[in-house]
Amino acid sequence: MPVQVRIPTPLRKFTGNSEEVSADGATVGNVVEDLERQYSGIKERLCDDDGKVRRFVNIYVNGDDIRFLSNLDTALKDGDEISIVPAIAGG
Amino acid sequence: MGHVIGLRCHECGSKYEQQAVHVCEECFGPLEVEYDYDAIKRTLTRERIESGPANLWRYRDLLPVEGEPAIGPHSGLTPLVRADRLARQLGVRELYVKDDSVNHPTFSYKDRVVPVALAKAVELGFTTVACASTGNLANSVSAHATKAGLDCYIFIPDNLERGKVLGSAIYAPKLVAVRGNYDDVNRLCSEIADKYGWAFVNINLRPYYTEGAKTYAYEIAEQLGWRLPQHVVVPTAGGTILPKLALAFDELLELGLVEGERPKIYTAQAAGSAPVVTALHAGSDTITPVKPDTIAKSIAIGDPADGFYVLEAVRRSGGWGEAASDPEIVEAIKLLARSEGIFTEPAGGVTLAATRKLIEQGRIPADESIAVCITGNGYKTVEAVADEVEKGHVIDARLADFDDLHRGLNSRESQEKVAEKTIAS
């Protein structure tokens, strides 16, 4: 599934400063793999050595936190929007 | 002169110059301010602090600002109330309320973090400041930004209490209510911060903002006569305060400004938004986010960014944590008002209700010193207790009417006293 992925500032050096990129995959995990194919090194920033999403990284599909969905197994459909957002302090 | 070396990643230790960034490019860990503690140790004394201004800037040697801070000249240094009447009700010996419900100018703990963040924003050359907020931060940023002549954008969830919304709107910031909860607002603001390049107090200024929370602990120690309490109970939302309190107590000990044992620290959360307490009780390191559902809206954060550090600090201190249901929160608000004359918002009710449970469980021993952190003001959230307090009596302007009422009240009071004595015996 082709989807759009919003890239936060700390990761834009991987994407040539692009704020939004296209990627492909049936699940969020597949999209992360596709991002890694396109922008080598980016996966290590998102996932720890066990392949789990890092503690300070939040991933959203159409605004919903994937931890409320099926984490990296969350299924995607055409045109879904994925956001990668660093954790934020309270207020 | 400030004593800041730069920023450092809490996770991987990568170093950065002072700038408006909050996330490590290497590992996404949070960035923190790094100080030259050797230099601080050479000059900082109790006397130097005591001769400083009567506001949070008396601790500026331990805050990340250069030059003369011009923001928040009346913020901080809130009362530490010896709460003997409340102590009797809870069956403990030595109890203090650190009362940020009367912090200047917007009546919450946020008036100690915002001056630090905005002073830094000005120092870094920003002219527009912004925040994502559950209300108190919005109020504080709005007021301080107005006074400092800064442009101000405020983002809040669309379901906040009237008082919290008005408490920002009155200062005429650009106020944006976002449909959703605080975690939704936060996600949006992270993307706005990226795109617009403003100084977001709790996003790209977070390393500086959170440093202001340390003053809460410095003040408790100084106001106790440079002594540490044995137990401190702190509310947890995003998780900023508690780890910074722990850090501040460590700094005071390390710098020789106080002696003795590090306090045990306890986290308090609303039962309807308790991901940290849940993880603590389960012995887990993983904070599973929740969708908040509680009257304690100011601390209704289901995905606490610093939740892991709260767990770490609580465990390291030997403390614990508890959650409070909505009815327990309301009871505790009334208890604090009717024992100590302090009207707090639901977050304060959460903290006191959790304190009560921890005492009842024997987690906090009755004969040791306890400080309860009250972080917000009840006059902003009257909805939370509006249906839970007596409405008062309405009479005509005739003395005879009052005489009747007075007789009725007296006889009811004496009946209640008889009933109390019967129960007590």
Image: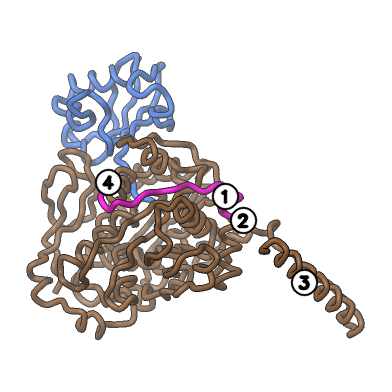
Chain colours: A blue, B brown
Q: Earlier in the sequence, mark 2 or mark 4?
A: 4
Q: Are marks 3 and 4 in contact (CB under 8 Å)?
A: no
- The one of B43 and B31 positioned closer to us in this rendering: B43
Amino acid type, callout 4: Glu
Q: Are marks 1 and 2 in contact (CB under 8 Å)?
A: yes
Quarter the N terminus of chain B occupies? bottom left
Amino acid type, callout 2: Ala
Residue B312: image tag: 4
Amino acid type, callout 1: Ile
Q: Are marks 3 and 1 in contact (CB under 8 Å)?
A: no
Q: Quadrant of residue A68?
A: top left
Distance from the alpha carbon under mark 3 to that under mark 2: 27 Å
Amino acid type, callout 3: Glu
Q: Are marks 1 and 4 in contact (CB under 8 Å)?
A: no
Q: Earlier in the sequence, mark 3 or mark 2?
A: 2
Q: Pointer 2: residues within 10 angstroms few (<14), some, or many (20+)? A: some
Q: Which residues are magenta?
A: B316-330
Q: Give the mark toward the camera: 2 or 4.
A: 4
- The one of B416 and B205 positioned closer to us in this rendering: B416
Residue B295: image tag: 1
Q: Which residue is mark 2?
A: B384
> Is disc 1 in the same subunit as disc 4?
yes
Distance from the alpha carbon under mark 2 to that under mark 4: 32 Å
Circle 4 SS class? helix
Q: Which residue is mark 3?
A: B413
Chain label for disc 3 = B
